[in-house]
């Protein structure tokens, strides 16, 4: 007994004295999986997606929730930056206007073509054509803009050059007496209010009025986001209830963030006017980092970059947000819900299924009747009701999905366990006095794990589809967050004019779902070769 | 057999009861009553409205009243639309959904079975690969991607069909094609794969070999002997297929703007029209449960090996 660990297991050999190694089911399955080309490719794709989703915060992409209203619905481009695209848009517009007013002349055939486009409601084709034509005519000198248009273009160019995006990296407060620096956000609300009064020169009552109003508006916006399309009176009532329910500390933190926003805005304004000059005379190379101090006590590190130098590889959405980063962050939400939701539902299913299968009798009867009845429910519809009533957020969505999706797992686990529970090794464990809990989770569940894993892999795409389905309807993830489903949903409405808003999220999602399905099929074939070609 | 049918019919009752009860209480749990949105009403008017909809009674009494109404086939008044009750709206939109659903199921069964059989008979040829490629597209790509993409390609770009519309609205039957294809895609994929694997298995079985040995025509073997055995797993899949069509129709009707029950359902869950939501869910559940029932009976008729006690 004592030297059991030190004694080495003798190497198994065959009659030719060659080493014989055992081959476990997992290793065998892995060998088969490696032969399946589609499954291997799918593993790579899934890994890349997961890495991208995890690394999203450190990737060099623009913030997914940053709204740049000037950059609405920009088309995808690898070479042209936002400024060029905006200028082109304006030029196309001006050329078209010039054509309509008669100062830019085109041939009869072209005229006819343009009008058929306009009749078919394809104005984007008209703009593209007029831009090309106009540029060509300006180049060979047969068309020049009127003086006012010329001035407009110049002004736009100037604006595009000088517009800056100022982001604040950190905010500091320097104590005038001890000269110690600390983060502005670590001050108390009273201190912040005092600081702001000092800075702005307003009196306390005006400020109080101001922030109460602003906080109310902020709360109202939140309510409207959660419950769209209600009459105004209802919003007002909900707001009053919300304010009544607000705790002291929550209100305090709302005031604090409000004051902080005010200070930040002032710094951004300061930096804009100060750096904007540099941007127009091109005396510095952007992006720049600067330290700006408002007065003796408040200072900030800011970073400024030319906003119109941005390149949107996959275009922008209706609020000027970068599609690429929205797709990556949307993938983060979708994949996370897919994985975490599957794990949760599989865990619930394992526990209930194992209990039903091992204990049998009344427990089995009750659990299986619950499963039977829940199978009969149109659960997607119940989820939709629950989301509509209890509010749309990721947590609710996640719970609603996890609660309904354990049914199949529990049935499967129950079947597995019932076939295993009368085998000798379980009897041996029982005769040695192992507890029910131990037998189930140490002996029975690990032995049916391969089936569970295969099934879970096939559940993940189904889970992602369900989540996206709800988000597509507007009942799942809500703005500013995104998921693939909500992105596709946003893109559907305007697909005739801005097809990229539909296609890129749809493509990203489809590739991932394909990969997951191939991987699941491959795993199933690998673990259970007999099941090949079955569903 | 008769005993089994009766037993199954009785089994439907608790499921329906639970659906109605769950929906009723979920709706009552919701924060804020349905009339919070009205302007600050005088106390008496508010009381009158509440009395009209029986909100002043104890919860159990309301529940009993609701159950009794449903037994009489009355789903109650709509909280948002004052002109008609829930029954009116459901019976107005249900036929549209039914037509769409029946066409979609027929497409997926017809094309699914035929391409499955073709793939099995011509195993490992281009027909097999093509059919199975379509099947995996149908399974993997969600219908809210298929729908808009089809719409973009065939309606916006090629302009073969209008982007949206419905025959009861504009009398144009062609508008039914895209939604029906979209709705049938997922079921088509599953049925095609099921048929293929089931057919492959059947073709290897002994009785087919016997038939071949007796020198029968291969088409007779295929359609007279093999097909019946192949169809069994497909019939048992029809239950989930109906459920898929019901939930899928919610999206398809929203994308293609079809005035059906699914679109109504989404709208009323945004509007918080609680009675309408519960009404739609009950109607859907009844349809689903009866479809499952019919599928079970069909299954036992097709397979003489199964006997029910």
Image: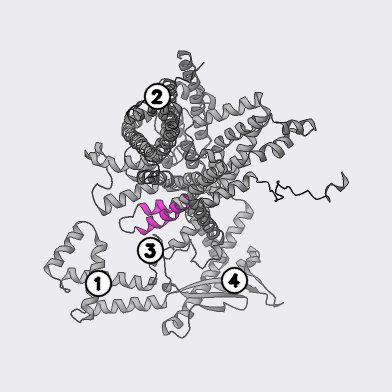
Q: On the image, numbered disc 3 is attached to which residue?
A: A72
In this view, A346 is above or below A317: above
Which numbered disc, 4 or 3, marks the residue that appears first in the sequence? Answer: 3
- Given residues A19 and B16, the one toward you in this image is A19
Q: Same chain for the residues at labels 4 and 1, yes or no?
A: yes
Q: Position of residue A110 (x, y in %)?
A: 15, 67
Question: Which SS type dominates the magenta stretch?
Answer: helix
Residue A366 quadrant:
top right
Q: On the image, numbered disc 1 is attached to which residue?
A: A132
Which is in the foreground here, disc 3 or disc 2?
Answer: 3
Residue located 51% across and 31% down the image: A375
Residue A134 quadrant:
bottom left
* Kind of element beneath mark 2: loop
Q: Position of residue B21 (x, y in %)?
A: 51, 28
Q: CA distance from mark 3 to mark 2?
A: 49 Å
Q: Which mark is residue A170?
A: 4
User: Residue most toward the top?
Assistant: B2
Q: Position of residue B51 (x, y in %)?
A: 46, 28
């Amino acid at each position: 007994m004592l030297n059991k660990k030190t004694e080495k297991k003798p190497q198994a050999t065959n009659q030719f004295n060659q080493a014989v190694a055992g081959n476990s089911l997992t290793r065998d399955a892995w060998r088969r999986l490696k032969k399946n080309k589609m499954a291997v490719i799918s593993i790579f794709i899934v890994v890349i997606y997961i890495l991208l989703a995890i690394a999203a915060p450190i990737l060099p992409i623009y913030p997914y929730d940053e709204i740049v209203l000037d950059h609405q619905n920009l088309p995808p481009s690898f070479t042209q930056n936002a400024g060029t695209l905006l200028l082109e848009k304006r030029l196309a517009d001006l050329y078209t206007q010039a054509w309509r007013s008669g100062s830019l002349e085109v041939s009869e055939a072209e005229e006819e073509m343009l009008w058929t486009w306009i009749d078919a409601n394809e104005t984007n084709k008209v703009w593209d054509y007029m831009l090309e034509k106009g540029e060509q005519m300006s180049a060979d000198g047969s068309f020049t803009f009127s003086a006012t248009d010329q001035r407009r273009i110049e002004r736009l160019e100037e604006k595009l050059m000088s517009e800056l995006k100022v982001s604040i990296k950190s905010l500091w407060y320097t104590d005038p007496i001890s000269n110690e620096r600390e983060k502005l956000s670590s001050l108390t609300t009273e201190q912040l209010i005092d600081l702001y009064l000092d800075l702005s020169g307003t009196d306390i009552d005006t400020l109080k009025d101001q922030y109460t109003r602003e906080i109310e508006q902020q709360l109202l916006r939140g309510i409207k986001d959660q419950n769209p399309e209600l009459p105004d009176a209802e919003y007002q009532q909900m707001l009053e209830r919300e304010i009544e329910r607000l705790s002291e500390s929550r209100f305090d933190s709302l005031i604090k963030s409000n004051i902080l926003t005010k200070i930040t805005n002032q710094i951004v304004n300061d930096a804009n006017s100060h750096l904007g000059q540099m941007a127009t005379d091109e005396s510095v190379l952007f992006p720049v980092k600067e330290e700006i101090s408002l007065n003796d006590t408040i200072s900030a590190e800011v970073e400024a970059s030319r906003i119109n130098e941005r390149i949107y590889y996959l275009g922008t959405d209706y609020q000027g947000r970068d599609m690429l980063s929205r797709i990556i962050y949307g993938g983060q939400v979708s994949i996370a819900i897919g994985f975490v939701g599957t794990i949760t539902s599989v865990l619930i299913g394992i526990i209930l299924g194992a209990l039903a299968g091992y204990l049998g009798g009344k427990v089995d009867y009750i659990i299986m009747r619950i499963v039977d009845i829940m199978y009969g429910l149109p659960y997607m519809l119940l989820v939709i009701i629950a989301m509509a009533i209890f509010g749309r957020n990721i947590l609710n969505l996640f719970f609603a999905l996890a609660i309904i999706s354990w049914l199949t797992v529990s049935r499967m686990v129950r079947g597995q366990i019932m076939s295993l529970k009368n085998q000798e090794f379980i009897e041996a464990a029982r005769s040695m006095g192992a507890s029910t809990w131990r037998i189930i989770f140490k002996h029975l569940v690990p032995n049916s794990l391969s089936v569970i894993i295969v099934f879970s892999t096939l559940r993940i795409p189904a889970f992602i589809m369900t989540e996206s389905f709800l988000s597509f309807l507007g009942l799942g993830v809500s703005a500013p967050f995104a998921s693939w489903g909500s992105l596709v949903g946003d893109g559907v409405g305007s697909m005739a004019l801005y097809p990229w808003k539909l296609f890129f999220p749809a493509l990203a999602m489809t590739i991932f779902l394909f990969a997951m399905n191939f991987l699941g099929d491959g795993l199933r074939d690998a673990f259970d070769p007999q099941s090949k070609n079955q569903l | 057999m008769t005993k089994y049918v009766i037993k199954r019919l009785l089994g439907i009752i608790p499921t329906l009861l639970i659906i109605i009860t769950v929906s009723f209480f979920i709706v009552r749990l919701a924060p804020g009553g349905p009339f919070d949105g009205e302007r600050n009403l005088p106390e008496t008017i508010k009381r009158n409205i509440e009395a009209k909809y029986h909100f002043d009674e104890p919860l159990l009494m309301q529940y009993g009243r609701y159950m009794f109404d449903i037994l009489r086939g009355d789903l109650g008044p709509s909280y948002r639309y004052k002109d008609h009750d829930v029954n009116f709206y459901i019976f107005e939109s249900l036929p549209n959904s039914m037509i769409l659903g029946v066409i979609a199921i027929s497409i997926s069964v017809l094309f699914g079975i035929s391409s499955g059989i073709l793939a099995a008979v011509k195993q490992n040829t281009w027909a097999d690969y093509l059919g199975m490629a379509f099947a995996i597209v149908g399974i993997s790509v969600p219908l809210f991607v298929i729908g808009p993409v089809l719409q973009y390609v065939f309606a916006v770009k090629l302009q073969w069909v209008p982007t949206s519309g419905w025959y009861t609205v504009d009398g144009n039957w062609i508008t039914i094609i895209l939604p029906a294809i979209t709705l049938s895609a997922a079921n088509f994929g599953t049925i095609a794969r099921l048929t293929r694997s089931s057919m492959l298995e059947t073709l290897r079985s002994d009785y087919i070999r016997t038939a071949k040995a007796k020198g029968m025509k291969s088409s007779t073997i295929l359609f007279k002997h093999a097909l019946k055995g192949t169809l069994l797993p497909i019939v048992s899949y029809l239950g989930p297929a109906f459920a898929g069509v019901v939930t899928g129709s919610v999206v398809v009707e929203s994308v293609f703007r079809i005035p059906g029950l699914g679109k109504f359902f989404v709208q009323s869950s945004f509007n918080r029209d609680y009675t309408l939501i519960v009404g739609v869910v009950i109607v859907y559940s009844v349809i689903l449960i009866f479809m499952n029932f019919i599928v079970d009976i069909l299954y036992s008729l097709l397979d003489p090996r199964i006997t029910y006690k």
